[in-house]
Image: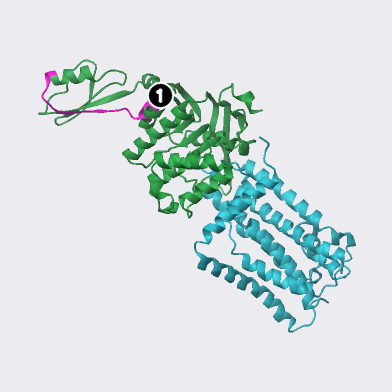
Amino acid sequence: MASPGPAQHLRTYGQIAWLWIRAAWQYPTSFVLLAVGNGLITGLDFVGLWIMFSHLSRLDGFTLHEVALLYGSASLALAVADTAIGSVERIGTYIRTGRLDQMMTKPVPLLVQVCADQFTLRRLGRLTQAAVVFGWACTYVDWTPLRVLVAVSMLVSGALVFFGLFVGFSCIQFWTTDATEFANAFTYGGATVTQYPLSIFPREVMVGLTFVIPVAFVNWYPCLYLLGRSDPFGTPDAFQFASPVAGILTMAAALLVWRTGVRHYTSTGS
Amino acid sequence: MTADHTSGPLIDVRDLERTFDVRRRVEGRRRRTREQVVAVHDLTFSVDGGEMVGYIGPNGAGKSTTIKMLTGILVPTGGEVRVRGLDPSRQRVELARRIGVVFGQRSTLWWDLPLRDSFDLLQKMYRISPARYRENLDRFVDLLDLGAQLDTPVRQLSLGQRMRGDITAALLHDPEVIYLDEPTIGLDVVSKGRLREFLRALNRERGTTLLLTTHDLQDIEALCDRVIVIDHGTSVYDGTLAGLHAQGGSTRTLVVDLVDEAPPIDVPGAEVRKVEGPRQWLSFPSDASAAPIVAAVAASYAVADLSIQEPDIEDVIRDLYSRGA
């Protein structure tokens, strides 16, 4: 029998996720309330930006709809990543309760199981909210075929960068459990930073967000291209097309850390 | 390529070793010191297909650590493990399809889902064909009497029902070998009996290999032809259960309730251990028959009641270990 490839894993992931959605749907009211609540809370993020712009017409030279494009694209990428693999954060709990041991005896790669376990669509709210903001901001973009391509690759690569950050930082829990807050500082923290034009930050922060926690590739560089702006820091134009590279590298690094973490895993006494 | 491995033993463990780094706080020192704890060392054994093996030893002897290395959960720090020719920690996902694992203290089922949904999830994970899945599910549900519980969320099941659910979950994909870690812990006598009967039938009809860790000597007596005793991380006995009793010098106890108080009973082949009013405890070798001793006692004394206590596996192992040390 041929060993199953990525397509097979994706299918298994889908089947597991679907069973969880079906199970959640047995309580439709609570499902809808969670999704709407999640949408409202994340919606407040953008309301905050909106209020800020009612006091100033530009933020470091960026108009409201330009900031909305930055916000919408990053938020969309985060929402996709969070929905697809958000439960990887719970790995510390899985280790403590022995659930991880159980998962390791199943013929599905551990990462696929961890990500699909207790799959929930309650982040649907964030996803919808981000899509609406992004869609609105897109109506202000002067579209060309290449810009469409960059926009699509931006969303996919952005999700990949967040996948990588979620997975990579969750791995800390293989060495020390209860590191969720520390990991959140980089994942959700990185996401918050991308809601603003990065030019408001000092150069050192910018460099860190490009080469260390590469969230600048989630939206900042490709959005500069979509908006026809030159980089205020004078970074090479090539960066504006480099998001897929950043996405793949982040993901690859995360998978490497994951593998190391799993081999280092020492289980709990039973 | 799997055909190459069918000739050798199913489970092959050689000089297996696993150590853990433990940090310990030492009195009077600010820093915690690092210490290496040896959980398993110099462990060698092999199991053929179709065997039923009891893997026993006191708490902390290394039983669970061994099972975790056999299933690929833990990476050994030394030696070699092969299960069906596969290296568990490196080929864990591939191996998982061929094995079933039941950790008695921890459920593999999903707490909030009905039992049926848990089984459906497993069908997807193991990619069991719908026909085979239906057949196995019907059979195990019938044999283990789970029909009425299929639509109950797992958290509402009793311990015995949950355990039967876990065993079904471990068998749906027709594993060649099943590891059971304390499968009867906390079950009542009737449930234990039914579970043992079920496991015997599974081994007889499907040739499923069984590796069982337990504290319950009766599990071993009912199921296992062979016993491996592990203590302090290494094997101290590997053979039949009868041989273990002989080697451990274990004794059974005859409890005699006399009609009246009497001096210690003197009969050949038995020795009085304790006297308490009219009740006396006589010990005799496990491999000796109780019949002549009972007859001798009954012939010379007025007996109100008699009972026989089986040796405790923990005592047997303790004996065995203290002799070896």
Q: Position of residue A127 (x, y in %)?
A: 66, 66
Q: Amino acid at mark 1?
A: Leu
Q: Position of residue A219 (x, y in %)?
A: 78, 65
Give the class, few, some or many, for how many residues have Cα within 10 Å of label 1's Cα (few <14, many ≥20): many
- In the rendered image of the structure, the colour used to display chain B is green
From the viewer's side, name the closer residue of B25 and B85.
B85
From the viewer's side, name the closer residue of B229 and B227.
B227
- In the rendered image of the structure, the colour used to display chain A is cyan
Q: Is residue B246 above or below residue B164?
A: above
Q: Is residue A208 visible?
A: yes
Extent of the magenta region: B299-321
- Name the quarter where the N terminus of chain B is drawn: top right
Q: Position of residue B160 (x, y in %)?
A: 38, 44
Residue hosting label 1: B320
Q: Is residue B261 above or below residue A217?
A: above
Q: Is residue A267 visible?
A: no
- The image quarter containing residue B86 is top right
Residue B310 shown in magenta: yes
The residue depicted at 17 percent of the width and 23 percent of the height is B264
Considering every residue shown, the one lying at the far top of the view is B268
